[in-house]
Amino acid sequence: MEIKDLGKFGLIERLTKNIVPQNASTQQGIGDDAAVLNYSNKEVLVTSKMFMEGVQFDLTYIDMEHLAYKVAMATMSNIFAMNGQPRQLIVSLGLGKRFKVEDIELFYAGLNKACAKWNVDIVGGDTKSSYTGFAINLTCIGEASKEDIIYRSGANETDLICVTGDLGSAYMGLQILEREKSVYYQQVEEYNNKVREAQRNNDQARLKALQKERTAIDDFQPDFAGKEYLIDRQLKPEARGDVLQQLRQAGIHPTSMIDISDGLASELKHICQQSHCGCRVYEKNIPIDYQTAVTCEEFNMNLTTAALNGGEDYELLFTVPIGDHEKIDKLENIKQIGYITKESLGNYIITRDGNEFELQAQGWAVKEN
């Protein structure tokens, strides 16, 4: 169905008719000029993220449902990184004419799955026409007690640097997707060249034979065998609210925290800059999945560089007092990777052979150029 057949308000009504607020802080959700929220004695956390087609995502290899799940998790991750609980989500979309109502319904299905996982209410948003591709803006609103909020600026000398999960896997998943995309478009280009040549020669028999080749291209299946974990890490990341629960149960309150969206090196330098400190990170302690290591070798890429600068892992990077060393050791999926130093000592990585090199952050800007 064409979006214009429903109109803006008809589309919103169709997408949101089954959305029922779950949070007491949501006094009025979708259906009026604005949402009404009441946080009583809690602090309000607000974060907003923009995602542009062709920059942050490519619809060649991600469907609308997975895309929505990913961007929702990426946005909620910022609230978790402040030790807060996401409660509401505002969704604004820029839509081109190529999108049908069914496409946007799939997108909202992905949003609803992500929101259901963390009990988040979709409370409003907007839709507009776009002439430059699909544009997504999400605003997530969360809550936390004043004493529970964790900033990037709280790290202290001798604090331990910790990270959840493993790093570099989402980036290597992206490399696989880009490779398979290139293979597909190469086949399409070769086919088009053959068709043009047959048309120039008026070779009807050749054109008929090429129809079978076109069917094979339409049925193209990417080769993800043995790399499913990496693909999931790229297409379906998970915000690490579960880690906050682990830390609370263990009686650990981090001194600083940030989520890893632009790469470990970039995020750690943010903490050091805002906390006015330095750091030492041990290369041997950076958690890396086996599939990530194997795939880096296949692509002839440096494994540590991928882990430091890959990005989109959406793991949590945080610091804790050195006295919490034993508590951290007992927790699953959390690794101590280094320690905080004086600001004058700079930011360095200690390699497996014991050499020190200045920590370089390439970040998202390098990858997008």
Image: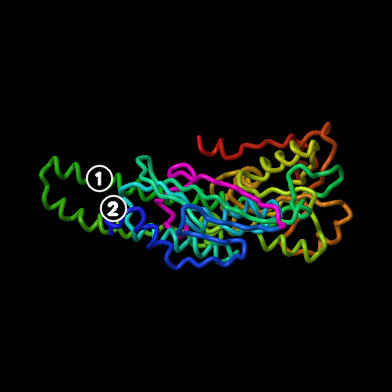
Label 2, secondary structure: give it.
helix
The residue shown at (55%, 50%) is 139
Looking at the rendered image, the quarter that the N terminus falls into is bottom left
In depth, the one of 33 and 199 nearer the eye is 33
Q: Which amino acid type corresponds to the residue marked 2 in the rendered image?
A: Lys
The residue shown at (62%, 65%) is 24
Label 1, secondary structure: give it.
helix
Residue 148, percent from left and from top: 76, 55
Residue 312 image label: none
Near mark 1 (Cα within 10 A), the count class, few <14, some 14-19 or many ≥20, is some
97 relative to 330 in the view: left or right: left
Residue 193, percent from left and from top: 24, 42
Res. 46 visible in picture: yes
Residue 271, percent from left and from top: 73, 41
Near mark 2 (Cα within 10 A), the count class, few <14, some 14-19 or many ≥20, is few
Q: Which amino acid type corresponds to the residue marked 1 in the rendered image?
A: Asn
Point out the frontmost of discs 1 and 2.
Answer: 2
Residue to which mark 2 is pinned: 4
Q: Are marks 1 and 2 in contact (CB under 8 Å)?
A: no
354 relative to 92 in the view: left or right: right
Looking at marks 1 and 2 on the same chain, the residue that comes earlier in the sequence is marked by 2
Q: Is residue 44 magenta?
A: yes
In depth, the one of 124 and 257 nearer the eye is 124
The residue shown at (43%, 43%) is 54
96 relative to 324 in the view: left or right: left
Q: Is residue 105 above or below residue 279?
A: below
Q: CA gap, disc 1 to disc 2? A: 34 Å
Residue to which mark 1 is pinned: 192
**In the rendered structure, which segment of residues is drawn in magenta?**
41-66
The residue shown at (89%, 55%) is 323
